[in-house]
Image (tube, coloured by chain):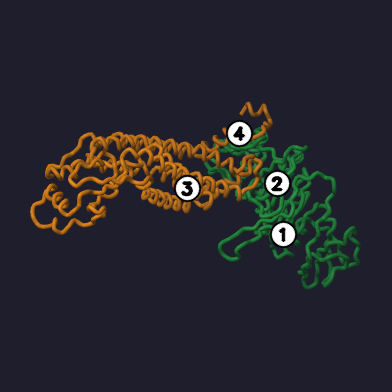
Amino acid sequence: MIKSLTVPQRTRARVGARDLLWLAWRQHRWVILSGAVLVAVLCGYMLSNEAGIVPVTYQSCGPLCTELFGRFPEQSAAADVQLWLATGFGGLVGVFWAAPLVAREFEQGTQLLAWSQDVSARRWLVGKVVVLAVAAVGFAAVLGVVAGGLVGRLASGDPTFYSAFSGTRFEASASLQASFALFGFALGLAASVLLRRTIPAMGVTLVLFAGVRGAVSLLRLHYLPPIQLLVPVGGNTPVATAGRVILSWDMVNTAGQVVTAIPANCMLPGTYTEAVMNACLVRNGILHNLVVYQPADRLPTFRLIETGIFVVLAVALFAVTWLWLRRSTVRGTR
Amino acid sequence: MTTTEPAPPASVPTGEPRAVRVDDLGKRYRRLRAPREIWALRHCGFSLPAGRVAALVGANGAGKTTLLSVLAGVLTPTEGTVAVNGIDGAPGRVAFVAQEKPLYRRFNAMDMLRFGARMNRVWDQDTALRWLERFGIPLNQSCGLLSGGQQAQVAFAVALGSRPSVLLLDEPLSNLDPLVRREVIGELLATVNDTGMTLLLSTHVVTELSGVADHLLLLAGGRLLIDGDVDELLTRHVTYLGPRADTPPGPGVVVTASHTERQSTFLVRLPDGTPPQPVAEPWLTKPVTLEQFVLAHLATNGGR
């Protein structure tokens, strides 16, 4: 204060970026710090999960049953919860960080304070977005890395039936989590600026975030055309490698047509083994299975594609917010 | 009461520097229910003399806050232009204190000054601090815990610290007790004198305007009815007081007339360029006060 008293009036050409960042940090530091605590707790929770280290074999299972079902890794239920929490972080960012960001200022009238200084509404908003979105994306990436580690351990405990493309396991990546957080933030911000009410903005953000995430996850297995493979009945299936996802597995007759039902003469009562069934199918002219699948090595590509989808959606939402704000406020010069 | 057409704008001395020029300003709000659109402000044009105090008066809903928000740059006008000139050729800078005196609740007064210093190109910490000390505002208490009057003082301190060329105050006195009102007005007038700043304040408290405002803007129903120098406006109006009558005893256009059983009062706008003429007994001629002038015009326009 003493210093400022000796310099009665200070003039400069422009309000600096550091000043905008200062305001955003000063206003939202507790939100950011509580987010950091939440992320740290979640990371600790995931790191403490020993899933996959000790595979379990169900004692009551026969050999086939064990092959099919008996190798779900221990604590995968807890891991599922943890992965759900981690992948929901982007939604939390949208609902609790971005949706109140501008709406609360409108409710308290403080946007009038902020916008009537020597800073345009848009620059003011950019300051907030930079501070909060960078923090959100960083936190989400950390969660993605830790969740990815957990999924890696799950996979090592279950090499045969583990699918890298299923739900939260697919999403356990730093880039995807970061893009979810960016999208959640952009969505919450757009709702905040357009609706100008905190609770409605939070509600709309929650619904749209869940809806878009769900809708995009339905497309996930079709980002690239799946590989189609004809496998001789009873032959080895080269697709049974860890991490792949099988979209369909159909019987094909000699004419190359898909046969949906097992022929009736193979359904006679009696003791069946795989060999008996296969022999019966071959007698009925079903020589091959058509396996449609996405191989495990496409995982990074698919994650990149989905990351791209959410980044594009986020950029579009930021653009809408920007244009809307420009329309409703004046003074491009500040 | 008799209703007549509003007074034309009083002529302003040409050549006097202008702090604000507004041309054909309009603001339309769109709504979901009928009426689908409302013009809160329409065909509004005026200019404010630099270094003076202008009062913006009008009933609730007349468009005062809309006009100030547009001038402050926090609201885009639907049509028209605003130009703000600075002092001594510098670029114009506007500071605005909204009616609710918004502050960040978790900031204390010192934080708010830091905010002002960082968010403005020009900052005068000395002026801002002096204002807070002058009115005894606790510096380390969260603004959310300050009284309404104290919050207003913090908002004024931030606005004055930014050394604007034009200061817009929306209902600045509404949260203040009468004694503090007078002090605040005095300090603001001193600042206007010292810095060459132009002050535009909106108010309901018409009684407080006498001796404060040099220039008057009167809004009704989103239209600018009066725009002129206060002294000129007042010298061009006169009150006639006398026995019950249907017409005033002298020349001029009746702005308002009120009658009791035995007495009539006319507020009259005199024909251009004529001083008040003496009138025959028992009529009395009285000068019009700013309060009477404003209330008469507000009443004439149905309060809107």
Residue B223 circle label: 1
- Asked if labels 4 and 1 touch by Cβ distance under 8 angstroms, the answer is no
Alpha carbon distance from label 2 to label 3: 49 Å
Alpha carbon distance from label 1 to label 3: 40 Å
Residue A190 circle label: none
Residue A187 circle label: 3
- Asked if labels 4 and 2 touch by Cβ distance under 8 angstroms, the answer is no
What is the three-letter code of the residue carrying label 1? Arg
Task: Judge depth for marks 4 and 3 and give the one in front.
Answer: 3
Chain ID at mark 2: B
Label 2 environment density (alpha carbons within 10 Å; few <14, some 14–19, many ≥20): some
Mark 1 element type:
strand
Residue B258 horizontal side relative to residue A292, left or right: right
Task: Judge depth for marks 2 and 4 and give the one in front.
Answer: 4
Circle nearer the N terminus (4, 3): 4
Circle nearer the N terminus (2, 1): 2
- Residue at x 9% of width, y 57% of height: A269
Tell me the colour chain B is drawn in: green
- Residue at x 57% of width, y 41% of height: A124
Q: Do marks 2 and 4 share a subunit?
A: no
Q: How far across and down, in percent of the image, does residue A92 sit?
A: 41, 45
Task: Judge depth for marks 2 and 3 and give the one in front.
Answer: 3
Label 3 environment density (alpha carbons within 10 Å; few <14, some 14–19, many ≥20): many
Q: How far across and down, in percent of the image, does residue A182 sit?
A: 46, 42
| Residue that badge 4 annotates | A16
Residue B182 circle label: 2
Label 4 environment density (alpha carbons within 10 Å; few <14, some 14–19, many ≥20): some
Residue B41 horizontal side relative to residue A251, left or right: right
Label 1 environment density (alpha carbons within 10 Å; few <14, some 14–19, many ≥20): many
Tell me the colour chain A is drawn in: orange
Chain ID at mark 1: B
